[in-house]
Image: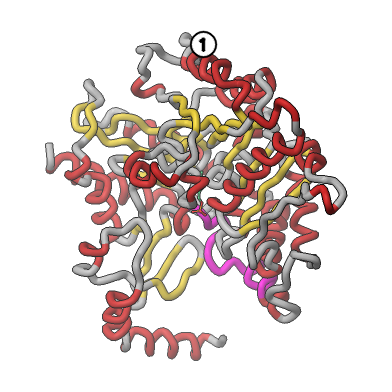
Amino acid sequence: MGKKKRRKRNETERRSSEAWIEKAQQSIWHPFTQMKEWEKEVPTIITRGEGVYLFDIEGKRYLDGVSSLWVNLHGHRKKEIDAALIDQIQRISHSTLLGLTNLPAIDLADRLLKIAPPGLTKVFYSDNGSTAVEVAIKLAFGYWQRKGGIERKKKKFISFKSAYHGDTIGAVSVGGIDLFHHAYEPLLFETVKVAPPTCYRCPLSLAYPSCGIACLEEVEKTIKRHRSELAGLIIEPLVQAAAGMLTAPPGYLKRIRELCHRYDLLMIADEVATGFGRTGKMFACEHEGVTPDLIALSKGITGGYLPLAATLAVQPIYDAYLGEYEEFKTFFHGHSYTGNPLGCAAAVANLKIFEKEKVLARIQPKIAFLKEQLDRWKQWDHVGEIRQVGLMVGIELVADKPEKTPYPPEWRVGAQVCRGAKERGVLLRPLGNVIVLMPPLSINIRELKRLLAVVGEEIQRVTSRIK
Ligand SMILES: Cc1ncc(COP(=O)(O)O)c(C=O)c1O
C-alpha cells in the first residue's frame, strides 16, 4: 500500500473511531479482564505497529514495553517477516500435517533442532504455549505407559507452586497461581507440588550463595517420596514469569536436571516465555547447559507474528511411540492448524533474523544498560526487589521495604503505575505489584531510556502518593 493510500485509510479509521469504540464494547469478552470495569472504559483500539511502537485508532503512539504480551522480538512490521508471509500466502496459507507435510514446517523443524539444547531430536507442532505444554504432558505420560510393566505406575507430575503454564486444563493442573487456578481444582488432575526458590523471601531465612540452594533438599525429599508414581517434572527455567518474574538462583536448574536423572523422571522445560533470546541466550536452559527431555516453545517462535508452538522431544520418547499400527502406540493428538505453513514461514524468517542480525550478540549491551540503570532504582523506598534475566524484568513494589510487606492487592499499585505510563505513551501490563518490562529485543538504547524514564517516574509518583 502506498503512503497516500495508507494515510487515507488511517484517516477513515480515525473518523469512524466512535463507531468502532461502541462496537468494541458490545462484542468482545477480553482475556484476564474484569469486563464490568472494561465496559466503563474507552478501549484503546490498536490499528498498526512499527518497530517497538503501536498506534491506536486516534493516531496516538505507544512504546510496546511488554512486546505485545511477551511475544514480539524484532519489532512490528519487520520487513523480512512481512515478506516471508506475503511469499507464503502466495503459495498456500494452510494445509494439514495429518498425512501431509509442508516446506515451512520441515524447514522450521530442522532449524529448531539445530538451535535447541543438544539431544532434542523431534518437533511436534501446536498453536500456543498452553498446547505446547499439554503436548509435553501427554507425551511424558504416554512414554511411561508405552514402556509398560511397573513403570506404568508413573502417572503423576511434579510442578511448582506459583508456576504458570497456560490456561488449558492440563496446563492449569500443573500451574500454581491460586488466583487463576484454584477455582478449577475439581476439574484438574492430581499433581505433586513443591515450592519454587524465592530468594527475596527465603522461607529458610538463608541467602544465596551461602545457602547452597538448600531449598532443593525439600524438592528432592518430595521427589524421593513419590518417585515410583512420577512421570515427570515441569519447570519454567530460570524465571517463573507470570508469578512475577521470580528468578531461580544460578545452579538451580542444573540441580533439577540432576534430580530428574537420579529419580528417573522426565524433565519438561516450559520455555514459552523464556525462549528465543529473552534471557540473553536463545533458550534459558543454555545458561546451565541443561537438555530437558521435552521443551515447550511458543510466544517468540514467530517473532510475535502468529500463533504457533512446538514441543521438542528427545529420541527415547519418540521411540516409545513407534510400533505396528495395531499396537496403537500412535500419539493420538493434533490440532487443525498444526504445522500451519504461514506460522512456520514467519518462524523461519524469525530465526534467519537472529542469524543475520546477530541478535543475541546485539542484545548484550542493552541487557547491561538495563541492569546498570535498574541497579539505581534498588535504593528507592518502595522498590522491594528488581529481578532481571536478560531482557525480562520484574520490579516488585512493596508497602514496607524493610519488612518486605506487599501492597494490598486491592490498591492495585502495579495497575496504577501502568495506567500512568500508558497516558504517557508506554504500554505495560503488571503482574499484581510487579511491574514487568519485557520490550522487543530490537529496542534501541534511546527507546530503552524513554521506557525507563517513564516507568521510573510513574513508580515514584504512585508510590510517593500512597505512602
Ligand atoms: C511459561 C509459560 N507457559 C505457557 C504459557 C501459555 O502460553 P499461551 O498464552 O500462548 O497459551 C505462558 C503464557 O504466558 C507462559 O508464560
Q: Nearer the viewer, residue 173 or 19?
A: 173
Residue 94: quadrant of the picture: bottom right
Residue carrying label 1: 212
326 lies left or right of 377: right
Q: Indicate how the structure is coloured in the image.
A: secondary structure
224 or 219: nearer the viewer: 224
Q: Quadrant of residue 341?
A: bottom right
Query: Is residue 80 on the magenta stretch?
Result: yes
Secondary element under disc 1, as helix, strand or loop, is loop
Note whether residue 372 is visible. Answer: no
Instruction: Indicate the quadrant where residue 436 lies.
Output: top left
- Which residue lies at the image location 59% right of the left edge and 45% below the top edge? 275
Q: In the rendered structure, does residue 28 fall within the stretch colored magenta?
A: no
| Closest to the observer, 204 or 76 | 204
Q: Is 368 situated above or below 299?
A: above
On screen, residue 230 above or below 214: below
Q: Position of residue 356 (x, y in %)?
A: 72, 55
Q: Position of residue 9 (x, y in %)?
A: 44, 88
Mark 1 close to ligand 1, CB under 8 Å: no
Estimate the x, y position of residue 398 in percent, counting from the top left: 24, 33
Amino acid type of the residue tagged 1 in the rendering:
Gly
Q: In the picture, which quadrant includes the N terminus?
A: bottom right
User: Does residue 434 sit above or below 354 in this rendering?
Assistant: above
**Residue 43 or 445: which is nearer the viewer?**
43
At 29% from the left and 30% from the top, the residue drawn is 384
Mark 1 crowdedness (10 Å alpha carbons): few <14, some 14-19, many ≥20: few
Q: What percent of the width, then of the height, locates residue 256?
A: 59, 23
Give the residues drawn in magenta, as a range: 70-85
- Residue 136 lies left or right of residue 439; in this view the side is right
